[in-house]
Structure formats: structure tokens, C-alpha cells
Image: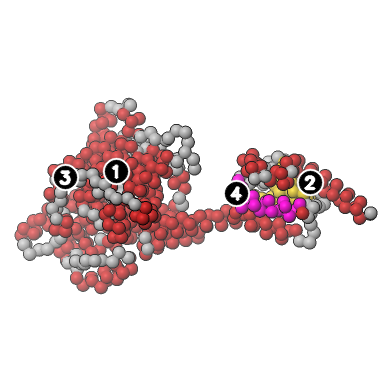
């Protein structure tokens, strides 16, 4: 991880405008309008589900969506609030309020920019897939759980944030279901599900909102006593003014408290945006600049808190909608943000009439699509270690929170990976005969005669802390009561060596030297040799005892063994 001489920040917008045309602009405008319409109900729903007002959800989609398209490294990425952040945003607001959320989002933006500057755009892709599937499924279940109250019209207040107490309250309250509210939610759900069967280009969520809202307004006018809660009844009249930028107080105590949450937002945002970009690249054949994309996401998350916004990331569903409607440059994302701005300025009063049960249905469908149950079924055919990582991450996300789930999931994945590497790293012992070509694709085999008193130990894999102890145990187990005169450590397959490996190797050399046993290192790669020299191993073992090939090592070891036996015999005669 190093900051190279040149900063890898090349927004796709600027390169796209060099060869822009009127026909391309037409395609991008059409795609941007469609995506803006699709994004409208999602921005409102994600804002409400996150614990903020619909206004904040729309402001986030407008400002964040514009900045992601303007500064991002993907040509078709659409940014905005997403379902993945609902759980963590809701928890941050519950603990630290909107002020704490703003600081955490700002810090996450800074972390994302730093990740891009340090060229971590490709490294973040190596987060194990079971972790991504586990916390995504956990978030989906949590989102689904948060919509039960509105969907069934239970009328509950002060609902517990924890999953188990929340469902306990739901089960005790199902006798209070509001059937008119449930009917609204159910009809909305049916419309959202059936719309793609008519045409995949029709935004099912938006159609459901328009149709159901109109029906509810007519029903209320005909039956004044009918109660179906709407956005306006819960949040009051929606403002049509973009919030003015504002600052907030920063101190080390608050930063320390919010740093884990900020880190979770940053990692989650990086994963989701780069995952969305990768999917988009597979469809369009373009290539995302991952580092620029992280910097662009970071800039968006640095800016939106000053307007009261919530975290921003790339949205897979909206990005794919953009692609399917002809969008191919960041101009489509900019048009999408402008469309949302126009709706915000001129159509905001109409949003007050949207039933909360309808938004509940929208989010339930979002949760179902996020769950990835087919992927989970597929992973259950994978090794048990992957299954355990998925399940641990899933249950930690649901029962505790996303911050703990990501931290523990990553730790568990690393431990299991190290165990797997350690188990697959072999340490072989040779004596008397050694086939030079063993373990290679060579057809011609050269068999070397290993003199009595010479033992060959081959490390097949990286020599790191997980293997160092295994090597030490192997040395002790194979030595027995008969000590060799020379030990050859064959390192042709050692790609790297860490501090623990160096320490164990140094201890082996020192103990061998004290017992009069010579150590010869064989097949050392150049990068490993540099580490050994820097650590002073060449001085301990002797620079001439670090050989480039096993043939040279065996010749040297046989000669040393013969000389040592001769010296021992002469001392015995005396």
C-alpha cells in the first residue's frame, strides 16, 4: 500500500466529453429521465427507512448522484442513497442523532478519498464473497423487518431497534392490523411484482405509488373517516427548498466514537460501488477506474452531510436501468440528478399524499431483491469455511449491527484463509535420493544422490507465521536422536517470508550452529533473498551457503558432510 508519484484521479466525464455527439446526448437524456423517475420512489423510501425525512432522501439523491457522475471512474454509475445503508444510518441516528450521522458520513468520505489516493480500488475487491452475501442478506432481512409496522398498519411507536425484541412486539400486536392499510400495501406489492411482467422498462414502484396514491385520495374523499397514514401526515408538509449548507462541531471525542461507524460506511460504500461498477463493465464492455471511483464516492460523501444528506454509493439497480435505457456516459447520471431536482422543486407537494404502506411495499421488494437467496443456496454447496463465514456475518448483521458483522466477518475469513493456506503448505523431507524435477511439469528427471548425514527440507508455499510453527515442529519431529551434519532448506516455492518466518529461520540457524550442523539455503527467489540479506541471515549462515539451485546445494552439502565425517573420524582416532 503506497501512494505513487501520480494520483490516479481521472473522472470518466472529462474523457467522455472529448468525443461527445448530439446522438449520444439524446440517448443520455432519455436514460437520465427514466432513471430519475425510477430513483424518485427509492430515494423517498430509503430516506424514510433510514430515519430521516423524504426531503433528505431526495436531496441526497440529487447532490450525491450529481457528484458521483461528475467525479466518478465509471461511465454509467448512478449514485444515491441505497438500501444497504438503511440499517447503519438508522442505528447512528438512534445513538448520535443527525449531527453524528453527518460527522460519520463526512469521515467516511475522507476514508474513501484516502483509499483511492492509496490505490486501494483493486484491493477492496478481494473482500471474500461470503461476507458480502452474508451482510447483504442480513441487511435485506432487517429492512424487511422495519416495514412490517407500516405495511400492516399496526400503529406502533417506539419500536425496539434490536431484531428479536422488534419481532416479539410485532407478534404481540398482529391483532391490531389495520385492514385498509394492509389492503393498500398488498395492492402496491402486487402492482410492483406484476409490472415487470408487462414491460421490464416500466418502473413498478413509481406506477404503484401513482395508482395507489390516486385510489387512496379518492377513497378518503368518499369516506372521510377512512384512516390510511400518508407521508404528509407523518412528516408534515414537505419543503421545496434545497437545504442551505451548514457546518458542524468536530472534536476528538466524537470522532473516536464515530470512527467505527464511519469505517463501516466507507467499506460498505466501496464494496457496493465497485460491485455495481464491475457488473456495469460486464454489460457495457467498458473499464472502471477503481481508484477514481473511490475518490468520486468520497467527494460525494464529504459534500452531502453539509446539506443534511445521508451516505451515498453506487446503486446497482439504477445503474442497470441506466444501461438498459441507452445511457453510456456520466451525462446520463447528471441528467438523472437534474430530473430529481425538478421534481423536488415543482412536484414536492404531491409526495405528501403517498401512503406509508405503499412505501413499505416498495422496500419489501427492495429487501427481497437484495436478499440474494439463490446465491446463498449456491454457497451452501461451497466449502464449510465459506458457509460458516456467510452464516456468522448474516446473524451478526441481523442480531447485532453491521459494524460488528463486517469486523468479525473479515477477521473470521482471514483466520480461515490462513488455516487453509497453512494446511495446503507442505514441508517435505528428503534423504539419500532427491528428484530435482519433482513437483514440476518437466519430463526429464534428474535424481541427485544425497550423502549420509544430509537432510533436505522443502517448504512448499509461503513462509509466514502460520507455517513457521509447522516448520519448526517438523524439524523437531524428523530429527529424532540422529542429528544430521548438514540441513538443506529448499525454498524454491517460497514466494515470500514474513517476520515470524525470519525469526524461526534465525533460531534454527543459531541452534544448528551451536550443534555443529551446517545450514544451506537452496532455490531462494530474488525478493526472498533481499529480505534475508536485509535481516542479516546471510551473515549467520554464510553468503556462499545461499544457493540458487538445488544441484549446487546438494554438491555443497555432500562436500560439507564428507569433510565433517572425516574430521570426526580423525578426532575419534586421536
Which is nearer the N-term, disc 4 or disc 2?
A: 4
Q: Which residues are magenta?
A: 496-513
Gap between marks 4 and 2 measured at Cα = 26 Å
Please name whichever residue, 196 or 74, is drawn nearer the observer in this view of the structure. 74
Say which mark, if any, is on residue 241: 3
Gap between marks 3 and 4 measured at Cα = 58 Å
Query: Residue 239: x percent and y percent?
Result: 15, 49
Please name whichever residue, 184 or 450, is drawn nearer the observer in this view of the structure. 450
Which is nearer the N-term, disc 3 or disc 4?
A: 3
Dot 2: within a 10 Å radius of its alpha carbon, few (fewer than 14), some, or many (20 or more) residues? many
**Given contact means CB atoms under 8 Å apart, are the residues at marks 2 and 3 in contact?**
no
Gap between marks 2 and 1 measured at Cα = 66 Å
Residue 502 within the segment the image draws in magenta: yes
Q: Secondary structure at mark 1?
A: helix
Q: Give the residue pinned by disc 1.
A: 303
Can residue 275 be spotted in the picture? no
Above or below: residue 179 compared with residue 416 = below
Using residue 46 as the reference point, say whether residue 422 is left or right of it.
Answer: right
Query: Residue 148: x percent and y percent?
Result: 25, 63
Q: Give the residue pinned by disc 2.
A: 557
Please name whichever residue, 434 or 101, is drawn nearer the observer in this view of the structure. 101
Gap between marks 2 and 3 measured at Cα = 83 Å
Helix, strand or loop for the magenta stretch, by majority: helix
Say which mark, if any, is on residue 498: 4
Query: Residue 268: x percent and y percent?
Result: 38, 51
The image quadrant that residue 173 belongs to is: bottom left
**Given contact means CB atoms under 8 Å apart, are the residues at marks 1 and 4 in contact?**
no
Which is nearer the N-term, disc 2 or disc 1?
A: 1
Residue at x-position 28% and y-position 35%:
331
Query: Residue 4: x percent and y percent?
Result: 47, 36
Amino acid at each position: 500500500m503506497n501512494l505513487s508519484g501520480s494520483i490516479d484521479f481521472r473522472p470518466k466525464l472529462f474523457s467522455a466529453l472529448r468525443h461527445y455527439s448530439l446522438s449520444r446526448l439524446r440517448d443520455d437524456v432519455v436514460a437520465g429521465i427514466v432513471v430519475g423517475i425510477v430513483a424518485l420512489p427509492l430515494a423517498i423510501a430509503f430516506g424514510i427507512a433510514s430515519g430521516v425525512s423524504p426531503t433528505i432522501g431526495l436531496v441526497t439523491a440529487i447532490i450525491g448522484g450529481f457528484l458521483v457522475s461528475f467525479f466518478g471512474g465509471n461511465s454509467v454509475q448512478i449514485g444515491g442513497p441505497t438500501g444497504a445503508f438503511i440499517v447503519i444510518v438508522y442505528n447512528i441516528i438512534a445513538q448520535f442523532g443527525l449531527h453524528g450521522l453527518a460527522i460519520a458520513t463526512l469521515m467516511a468520505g475522507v476514508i474513501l478519498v484516502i483509499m483511492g489516493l492509496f490505490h486501494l480500488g483493486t484491493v477492496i475487491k478481494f473482500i471474500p464473497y461470503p461476507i458480502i452475501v452474508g451482510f447483504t442478506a442480513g441487511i435485506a432481512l432487517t429492512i424487511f423487518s422495519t416495514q412490517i409496522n407500516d405495511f400492516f398498519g399496526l400503529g406502533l411507536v417506539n419500536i425496539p431497534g434490536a431484531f428479536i425484541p422488534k419481532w416479539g412486539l410485532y407478534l404481540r400486536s398482529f391483532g391490531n392490523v389495520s385492514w385498509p392499510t394492509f389492503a393498500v400495501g398488498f395492492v402496491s406489492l402486487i402492482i410492483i411484482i406484476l409490472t415487470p411482467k408487462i414491460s421490464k422498462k416500466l418502473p413498478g414502484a413509481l406506477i404503484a405509488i401513482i395508482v395507489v396514491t390516486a385510489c387512496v385520495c379518492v377513497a378518503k374523499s368518499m369516506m372521510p373517516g377512512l384512516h390510511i397514514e400518508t407521508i404528509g401526515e407523518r412528516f408534515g408538509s414537505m419543503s421545496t427548498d434545497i437545504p442551505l449548507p451548514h457546518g458542524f462541531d468536530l472534536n476528538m471525542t466524537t470522532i473516536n466514537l464515530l470512527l467505527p461507524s464511519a469505517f463501516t460506511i466507507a467499506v460498505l460504500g466501496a464494496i457496493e460501488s465497485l460491485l455495481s461498477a464491475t457488473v456495469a463493465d460486464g454489460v457495457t464492455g467498458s473499464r472502471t477506474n477503481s481508484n477514481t471511483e473511490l475518490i468520486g464516492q468520497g467527494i460525494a460523501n464529504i459534500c452531502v452531510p453539509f446539506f443534511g444528506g445521508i451516505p451515498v454509493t453506487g446503486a446497482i439497480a439504477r445503474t442497470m436501468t441506466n444501461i438498459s435505457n441507452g445511457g453510456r456516459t456520466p451525462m446520463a447520471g447528471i441528467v438523472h440528478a437534474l430530473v430529481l431536482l425538478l421534481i423536488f422543486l415543482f412536484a414536492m407537494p404531491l409526495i405528501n399524499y403517498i401512503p406509508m404502506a405503499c412505501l413499505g411495499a416498495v422496500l419489501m421488494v427492495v429487501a427481497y431483491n437484495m436478499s440474494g437467496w439463490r446465491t446463498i443456496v449456491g454457497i451452501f454447496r461451497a466449502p464449510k469455511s465459506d458457509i460458516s463465514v456467510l452464516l456468522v456475518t448474516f446473524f451478526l448483521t441481523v442480531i447485532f449491527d453491521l459494524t460488528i458483522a463486517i469486523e468479525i466477518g473479515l477477521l473470521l475469513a482471514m483466520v480461515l484463509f490462513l488455516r487453509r493456506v497453512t494446511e495446503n503448505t507442505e514441508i517435505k523431507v528428503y534423504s539419500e535420493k532427491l528428484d530435482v524435477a519433482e513437483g514440476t511439469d518437466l519430463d526429464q528427471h534428474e535424481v541427485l544422490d544425497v550423502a549420509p548425514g544430509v537432510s533436505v527440507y522443502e517448504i512448499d508455499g509461503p513462509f509466514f507465521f502460520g507455517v513457521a510453527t509447522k516448520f519448526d515442529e517438523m524439524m523437531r519431529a524428523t530429527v529424532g536422536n540422529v542429528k544430521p551434519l548438514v540441513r538443506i532448506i529448499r525454498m524454491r516455492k517460497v514466494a515470500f517470508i514474513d517476520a515470524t518466518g525470519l525469526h524461526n529461520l534465525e533460531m534454527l540457524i543459531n541452534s544448528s550452529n551451536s550443534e555443529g550442523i551446517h545450514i544451506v539455503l537452496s532455490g531462494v527467489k530474488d525478493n526472498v533473498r533481499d529480505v534475508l540479506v536485509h535481516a542479516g541471515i546471510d551473515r549467520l549462515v554464510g553468503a556462499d551457503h545461499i544457493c540458487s539451485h538445488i544441484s549446487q546445494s546438494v554438491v555443497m552439502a555432500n562436500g560439507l558432510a564428507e569433510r565433517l565425517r572425516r574430521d570426526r573420524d580423525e578426532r575419534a582416532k586421536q
